[in-house]
Image (cartoon, rainbow, N blue to C red):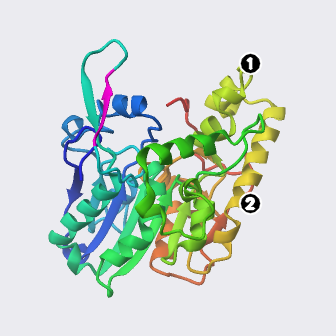
Amino acid sequence: AVCLDGSPPAYHWHPGTGSGSRNWIVFLEGGAWCSDHASCAQRARTSFGSSDLMDRQTLFLGILSNSAQENPDFYNWNRVKVKYCDGASFAGNVNTTVTVAFDSDSQQALGLMYRGEKIWKAVVSDLLSKGMSNAEMALLGGCSAGGLAATLHCSSFKELLPRTTYVKCVSDGGYFLDAKDIAGNFSFRSFFKDVVDIHVSISQLLFYVALTSLVQCFFPQYVAPHIHVPIFFVNPAYDVWQIQNIFIPDAADPDRKWTTCKYNPYVCSQDQLSVLQGFRTEFLKAVEYVRGVDQSGLFIDSCFSHCQLEGLTWNTNTIGNKTIREAFGDWYFARGGSSWKSIDCPYPCNPTCIKWTSWRH
C-alpha cells in the first residue's frame, strides 16, 4: 500500500471527544486522476502522488470542522481526511512497479505504483486499530475524485466495520456524468477508460458484475443501483468541473468560443446559458435512479460550484430554506419525515449561491 512514488499513504486525524468519541467520519480527498504513465509520473512529484510532499497539518472546515456552531452534528466526532496519492480514486491494483522516464530528455527513471485499492484497505485497517473497530456511527465521504471513491468503496466500508455500526456514505461533487460533450463525443468516457486501463482497477470494480464494461464503474449513474448502503449525493446541477472537463472540454471547443463562459459562467450569453441548462437536464436524468431509492439522499442545487461540504457552502447554499448541513444531517440521522431528496429550481433562481470569481483549476 503505497503512493504513486512508493511513499506510504497518509491521513489527517482529529480525534473525537465526549459523545462523539466512538463516531467516525472518513473523508477521502479529491484531486482528479492521471490517465497515462507520463501524467502519473508528473503527479508522483506532487502531494497528489507522494506523501513526502504533503502538508503535515491541514485545516478542517465544514463537515470536518470542530466548531459546534459551524458543524453541530459532527464537530466532536473522530474526523479523518485521507490524502489522495494514487491517481485513480483509490481503485488501482497493479502489483508490479511501472518504470518510466521523468521526461524525454531525462536519463532519470521513476518507478510508479498503482495501488489505490491497497491504500484504501490499509488506511481502514489502521483506523480500525486506532478505535474505529468500536465505532457506533460512521460516515464515509469524499470530494470530487474522493466522492467517486466514496461511492466505489461505500459497500466495502460497511463490510469492514462491525455489523452493529450505523454506516452511511456521502459523495460531494463526485457524481460524474457519462454524457456527450458539446461536439457530440463521449470524450470523458474515453478519458476514464484510459484511467481504468492504466491502473488496471479490476478486483475492486468487478464487484459490479452487472455492468457491461469496467469504465462504467467510474460513473455513479451506473454504480448507484448496485450500492446497498444508504448514500447521499451532494452535487450542483451546474458542476463547474464537469462543465469545463466533460461538457465543454477544450477539444470540443477548438475556436475557444466557450473559454470565457466556462471559466466565468456569470458572463455567459443567453444562448450559452440555454446550452448549460441542457447540461442540468442531463444531470437530473442521471440521478433519476437515486431519486427513487428511499434510503438514498440528494442535494442538487443550482449553483456554479463543485465540492460544497468543506467550506462556506456547507452553511450557506440552501434548497427550500435548508442548508446543505441541515439537509444532510436530517438524512444521516433520519430526522423528520422528509424524502431526503432536494432538487433546486434552474439557475438563476437561488440567491444563496456563493459567487466565485474564477473556476480555472
Does the image show residue 344?
Answer: no
Circle 1 Cα neighbour tier, 10 Å, few/some/many (<14 / 14–19 / ≥20): few
Residue 156: x %, y % from top left: 39, 71
- Residue extending farthest to the left is 130
Residue ID for mark 2: 285
Badge 1 amino acid: Asp
* Residue 270 belongs to the span the image colors magenta: no
> Residue 116, how many percent across, how many down?
34, 52
Q: Is residue 329 left or right of residue 6?
A: right
| Label 2 to label 1: alpha-carbon separation | 29 Å
Left or right, 338 with respect to 21, comes to right
Between 257 and 193, the residue placed more toward the observer is: 193
Q: Are there few (<14), some (14-19), or many (20+) residues within 10 Å of tag 2? A: few
Report the side of 10 relative to 211 (left or right): left
Q: Amino acid at mark 2?
A: Lys
What residue is shown with label 1?
255
Q: Residue at x 24, y 20 (%)?
A: 108
Q: Which residues are magenta?
A: 97-102
